[in-house]
Amino acid sequence: MGVPVIEGYDGVVLWDVESFDKVTEIWSSAEYFSDVVPDEEKFCDRKDAILVRLNIVSINDRSSEFPIPRTAASLPLLQEDRARMVCIIKRKEGTTMDEMKKHWLGEHIKVSSLTLLGKEMIKVEQNHLASPSPIVSFSEPPSDTALPDWDGITLIDTPSFDTFLYPEDAKALGEDNAKWLAPGKLLMLPVNVATIIDNSMCHMVIENSKG
């Protein structure tokens, strides 16, 4: 694809939560440090992990057309019919954050929707940095690891990673990216997805019942 793949990370965990305050309360509780942290330390190097606080903008969601297979397995399984690309962006020098958001939410969506990639996307979410302190060390106390200067993250779900390889898309997306992204700073992390908890439908039912 001609785009650097982010190095130094072995995986990503995504939490959709009601508020940052609520999850911070959980992560700082004595129960979390006594019960959860010891398990995390068995497979995760916490001092090198980072926490990114993001505001979600759902651009396209056709998940209902591609339901996640349910199994009787005791453990969650990697989804074999879905690929996810984590795209990490850095705005072009001289471009303000407001200018970047305007293009990202406007022209970029229009350009992407006309590509072959756009036509095959299952789900697209833009993740805008939340203020204050959107990127922090996950360890306590904070480690000395330098924090990245990212400006946003896009999550793209497709039927397979081949969807990202259409040569016909390279020109259109490349020309658009040149308008607002820093050259050579777009990073991609291809990941296989395992859904552990999904209470989205529960929230939808509760919200709809209020009407």
Image (tube, rainbow, N blue to C red):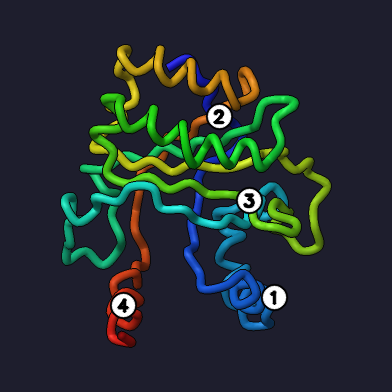
Q: CA distance from mark 3 to mark 1?
A: 22 Å
Q: CA distance from mark 3 to mark 2?
A: 16 Å
Amino acid tagged 3 = Leu
Residue 202: image tag? 4
Q: Which type of secondary structure does the marked residue at label 2 adopt?
A: strand
Q: Which residue is mark 3?
A: 129
In which quadrant of the rendered view does residue 165 lie?
Answer: top left
The reply to whether callout 4 and callout 2 are in contact (CB within 8 Å) is no
Q: Which residue is mark 2?
A: 187
Q: Is residue 174 left or right of residue 42?
A: left
Amino acid tagged 1 = Ser
Amino acid tagged 4 = Cys
Q: Is residue 207 left or right of residue 152?
A: left
Instruction: Kindly tell me whether residue 162 is visible in this rendering.
Output: no
- In the rendering, at what x and y percent does residue 145 appear? 78, 44
Viewer-nearest of discs 2 and 1: 2
Q: Which residue is mark 1?
A: 28
In which quadrant of the rendered view does residue 169 lie?
Answer: top left
Residue sitting at x 56%, y 31%: 6
